[in-house]
Amino acid sequence: MAEAIPAVKSKAAKKRRVDPEIGVAISWKTIKSQKQLIFMSVPLVLYVILFNYAPIWGWSMAFQQYRPALPFKDQKWVGFDQFKFLFQDDAFLGVLRNTLAMSFINLVLGFVTAILLALLLNEIKVRIFKRAVQTISYLPHFLSWIIAAGIVSTSLSINDGIVNVLLMKLHLINDPIMWLSQGKYFWGIVGASNVWKEVGWNTIIYLAAITSIDPSLYEAAAIDGASRYQKMRFVTLPGIKATFVILLIMNIGHILDAGFELQYLLGNGLVIDWSQTIDIFVLKYGISMGNYSLATAAGIFKTIVSIGLILIANSIAKRLGEERLI
């Protein structure tokens, strides 16, 4: 009997084997059946190739002493000199510090506030009020950063800014504070501004994940005597964990994307040591100073680090048995 079992397994395995020619035929049959979807995807594929992959040839400037007036074959190749200069430049190291700090603040505040707001909205039973709060919270997402930066700047004005007025009315401060003139406040202002603008929009995906949780789990928790807080902790949060992990992996890949518009619009000479990010550094050296090679080297560094962080985060999630991106 024991000898018969392997024989049966081997016969079943042979049946599962697919002839390569049959496999190719099935593949072509699948392609033909989905040809409309393939044709629809062609413009998107061409867009990605044209705007995401074709410009990669420009990375060669990072290994040259690039001069715009010279043809490509006459450019002077300098190897990794631009990268060496980059990491020996105190200005770039300061920019890297600012970028990492603001990215970390945005990452933590973004996730915490979005999940918290989604949990609170999920507990609201009055549908009209729930929709009103959700609509009001994600409307700032549709404002451009120019308008948003103007609102932030006006709110933090030293004369009649609502923040100073409110703090003085509450007797928390005695004199108005020049928020945008002191570097120690800048990172917090950026983090708070990002939360105000994006928290409602970031909440939408968590609300969608919450709706996919089996209602019977809440009923079972209620039968066991769980409170609303316990339902959130032991049912809702585990139910959205997979969504949280995927979004976390994706956001870790953008850890060097601290932003450009808000820092550029709110920054000034008094807080320049706190406000400049890698994107502003690239603009400054690449456009203002014409050092395209150094700006390209900084861009390559940012891309490589982002890809590496995504792979590391994905690998850690895989080892922990969580959902992963790749």
Image: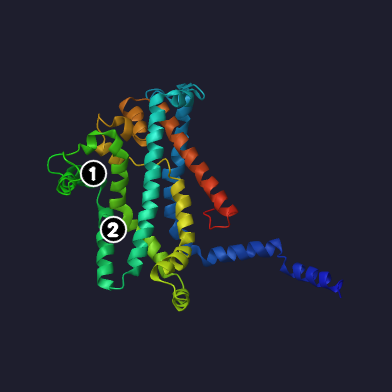
Q: Nearer the viewer, residue 178 or 169?
A: 169
Residue 302 in percent (x, y) is at 45, 37
Q: Dot 1 lies on which element?
A: helix
Give the residue displayed 25% in from the left and 69% down from the top.
129
Q: Nearer the viewer, residue 151 or 284?
A: 151
Q: CA distance from mark 2 to mark 1?
A: 17 Å
Residue 177 vs 242, above or below: the answer is above
Q: Are marks 2 and 1 in contact (CB under 8 Å)?
A: no
In primary-sequence order, the first of circles 2 and 1 is 2
Q: How is the image coloured?
A: rainbow
Task: Classify residue 68 by image quadrant.
Answer: top left
Count the numbered circles shown: 2
In the image, farthest residue toward the left = 160
Residue 190 in percent (x, y) is at 30, 43
Give the residue displayed 49% in from the left and 39% down from the top.
305
Q: Amino acid at mark 1?
A: Ala
Q: Nearer the viewer, residue 280 or 165?
A: 165
Give the residue displayed 28% in from the left and 68% down from the top.
130
Task: Classify residue 153 by image quadrant.
Answer: top left
Residue 57 vs 147, above or below: the answer is above
- Badge 1: residue crowd in 10 Å (few <14, some 14–19, many ≥20): many
Q: Mark 1 = which residue?
A: 149
Q: Mark 2 = which residue?
A: 138
Q: Dot 2 lies on which element?
A: helix
Q: Amino acid at mark 2?
A: Tyr
